Amino acid sequence: MHEPHPVSSPQRHLLPRVLRLPTPSSSYGVFPRPLHRRRRLGNGRRPLVSFSSSLSSSAAPLLRRRAAAAVPLLRPRSRRSPSKICAKIREIFMPALSSTMTEGKIVSWVNVVVVESDKADMDVETFYDGILAAIVVSEGQSAPVGAPIGLLAETEEEIAEAPVAAPPVQAIEKPAVAAGPKSTVLTPYAKKLAKQYKVDVASIVGTGPFFTSSISPAVVATAAAVAPAPKAAPPAAPAPPIPGATVVPFTTMQAAVSKNMVESLSVPTFRVGYPVKTDALDALYEKVKPKGVTMTVLLAKAAAMALAQHPVVNSTCKDGKSFTYNSSINIAVAVAIDGGLITPVLQDADKFDIYLLSQRWKELVGKARAKQLQPSEYNSGTFTLSNLGMFGVDRFDAILPPGQGAIMAVGASKPTVVADADGFFSVKNKMLVNVTADHRIIYGADLAAFLQAFAKIVENPDSLTL
């Protein structure tokens, strides 16, 4: 646990008051967003530590109802009905900046609190007005979502109390031990839990009068939670580092990529390659390149049009028991940035022309390199495109991202000798496209039909400009 340490007097400023959001452990799906404006506080002072928050449309009604229940606590104080807040020292918690974030790293406490998530650096906002009294998690340190990262005081006189205020530790009460012989009755499910977790039911006191004791599944589960874990074998000692080698810990983004890649190993995948002639696409690219259209956008548009014809390739399977046809075709495109990899998403790529998609793509790449993408701009993809052909790579296989049905790996276009139906030889530009797909929902015939449709669009690209 991080020890809080007091903030020096130049850093003691009031913080802006905002509506208190649900804690990160709630199911409302509320995540903070970057702050775009800051209001001036009393006495002409600006906040040193500034946070912001936003709601998804589906979560807003739930939050309004929750906020309404807390009105007496959150309304500004008035002379007619003063609202007394008991807690003088409040905690600032590590927010959940995305649906996949499990911990965050403090980048800076200067001017604004900047937190590094698994995909971006974002400014976040606290829940109350106050003075930053102590920093629990210093710059460069990490903390899990929901953990305290700082302490707030209402007045300067209360700052002295902050260093001794430690986050509360919730104690787990052990079930009472039986004091005498009783006839114990277990429900079937309680008996199953006791056997599964090896809980001695004789040491648990259930509920019931006189000589009968009824033990519920909840009581067994509580006993299992406090039962001592079996002693594990000591881990093997790590191999000594090679002389002269330097060990570099993962950044938050690299740790997220590592986690996703390991998770993808649990999905049964297969790969299909398909050669595609690119002479017509190359000619179109030379025409639209001066207008800001990139080859990546042309390929994303062609993939989106092919997915519209074969929606099963745009589907997803998350539980192994069913799959979902996605109503939107959102093409995620892999982009290498400093310190990691991210996949900005061209949402509804089948519905917009290549010029609008190019403008949107330019904005997304700029935000990705500045680590300012919003969660919906990188985690809403339904199909992924990885283009290493721009680096001269002629073929490669891509790893399927978790939560998607397929990913396309595009190689470089190179001159190739081909023979036509009459036996005449000629030189054509060809690229090899490899698709990795989830075999639980996409079969070989589905992927072959999709690749045929994709090749037809690329080889006759007039439809891309419509």
Image (spheres, helix red, strand yellow):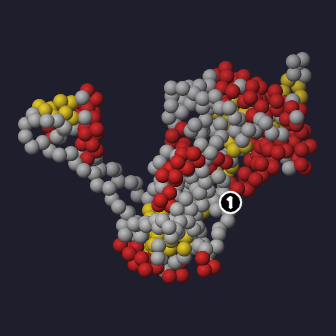
Work out whether residue 372 or residue 45 is closer to the camera in this orientation and state it.
45
Give the residue at x 77% y 48%.
360
Which x, y percent locates residue 294? 82, 46
Above or below 257: residue 140: below
Q: Quadrant of the N terminus?
A: bottom left
Q: Quadrant of residue 416 in the image?
A: top right
Task: Please indicate whether residue 394 sits to the left or right of residue 462 in the image.
Answer: left
Which x, y percent locates residue 94? 49, 59
Q: Residue furthest bottom?
A: 9
Residue type at tag 1: Ala
Work out whether residue 55 or residue 323 is closer to the camera in this orientation and state it.
55
Q: Is residue 363 visible?
A: yes
Q: Residue furthest top?
A: 422
Which x, y percent locates residue 452? 76, 25
Give the residue at x 90% y 49%.
290
Q: Residue furthest right?
A: 287
Q: Secondary structure at mark 1?
A: loop
Q: Is residue 396 visible?
A: no
- Residue designated by label 1: 370
Work out whether residue 320 or residue 180 is closer to the camera in this orientation and state it.
180
Give the residue at x 33% y 59%.
169
Above or below 124: residue 56: above
Task: Please indicate whether residue 60 sits to the left or right of residue 458 in the image.
Answer: left
Q: How many marks?
A: 1
